Amino acid sequence: MKILVLPGDGIGPEITDATLAVLDRANARYKLRLEWQREAIGLVPLKERGSTLPDEVMEAARKAPGIILGPVSHLDYPPREKGGINPSGELRVKLDLFANIRPAKSRMGVGLTGKPVDLVIFRECTEGFYSDRNMFMGRGEFMPTEDIAIAVRKVTARQCERISRVGFEWARKRRKKVTAVHKANVLHISDGLFLREVRKVAKEYPDVELDEKIVDAMAALLVRDPSRFDCIVTGNMFGDILSDEASEISGSLGLAGSVMAGDDACCAQAQHGSAPDIAGKNIANPTSLILSAAMLFEWLAARHSRPEFEQAAKAIESAIDNALKSPQTRTRDVGGSLNTDAFAKHIAEQIG
């Protein structure tokens, strides 16, 4: 099985190398028979070939059973017509990776609020207000005059139903509670449609409790008591914001794994950005991408009936949790002293 590896921009190559060092150990230990196909995306191919996501890389992504995607500096990319394609958004739409699954867990004890965090946010990530991916042709925002900007929000019953079902399936295996986050008090039609589909799916899961929260109240409640939440289902923008909040409350955005998953493909992606200010200094924390890769392994285990991938994922997560218990085995951003390579080496050694 050949996994496509796309290191990205900024600290992307560094944390990708660190992640692969861990995965190489897991690959050998659990006899996963994995190979890595490494391809360039982002600013380097933009300069060399005129595109941040060359056609041959997109074709490789279509064929890959799994993808590891490093952070990208898409804010620095030129317009799409000049080669500036957001790889993350493009992969989501072209490969139908509709479910952005983002766990937030206080791996160093209690979170920043003094209370434990253990929740998962399920974010529909192919539509909403995100204008680079919510239209078949063109973009979902435009300027009829130089002083007016208009953004279009796309919400479909199908994608609301799909993301809801993923959330309820996870909840059934966890603490049996789903919280649907919306703004239907203002966005009556679009979030009304979202709630309609969530409630429809909920009827198929009588063993799972459905809770509903308005997004601004939800943002406050995450700070007040994150322990009351289990699985949170929401749309693109709300999920993007709330998952960063939840991860930071749990301890650090740098400790949060994430995958973009569909029915037939899955992509591991760190929750954080490319941090160009520390690129090349060997101080970036690779935990988020390592945990994301472990989540990819879990998806592969279920998709291909390969229990050894599940075992490898559990071993990686356990090694991360054990390392984070002590400042001596943490990276600098979370109170430790290890650099990127040293942290990855330590995690790999704990796997066996």
Image (spheres, grey):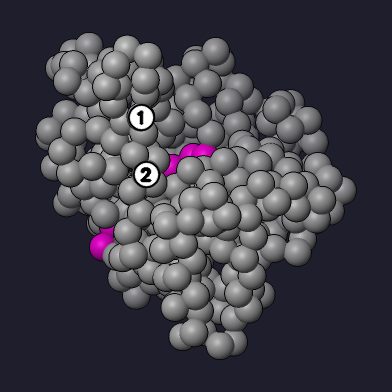
Q: Quick one: which residue is furthest to the right in this view?
A: 114
Q: Residues within 10 Å of mark 1 (few under 14, many from 20)?
A: few
How far across and down, in percent of the image, does residue 220 sit? Answer: 74, 47
Q: Residues within 10 Å of mark 2 (few under 14, many from 20)?
A: some
For discs 1 and 2, the disc positioned in front in the rendered view: 1
274 on left or right of 142 = right
Residue behind mark 1? 150
207 on left or right of 28 = right
Residue 143 position (above or below residue 116): above
Identify which amino acid the numbered label 1 is placed on.
Answer: Ile
Q: Which mark is residue 321?
A: none
Determine the secondary structure under disc 2: loop
Quarter of the figure that contains the N terminus: bottom left
Magenta-colored span: 264-271
77 on left or right of 332 = left
How far across and down, in percent of the image, does residue 229 sit? Answer: 69, 63
Pick the residue in front: 253 or 294: 253
Identify which amino acid the numbered label 2 is placed on.
Answer: Arg
In percent of the image, x 31 and y 31: which residue is there?
141
How far across and down, in percent of the image, does residue 134 sit? Answer: 29, 43
Whether residue 267 appears in magenta in the rendering, the answer is yes
Residue behind mark 2? 153
For the residues marked 1 and 2, what is the alpha-carbon distance in whole angstroms? 10 Å
Residue 71 position (above or below residue 81): below
How far across and down, in percent of the image, does residue 263 sit? Answer: 29, 65
Whether residue 290 appears in magenta in the rendering, the answer is no
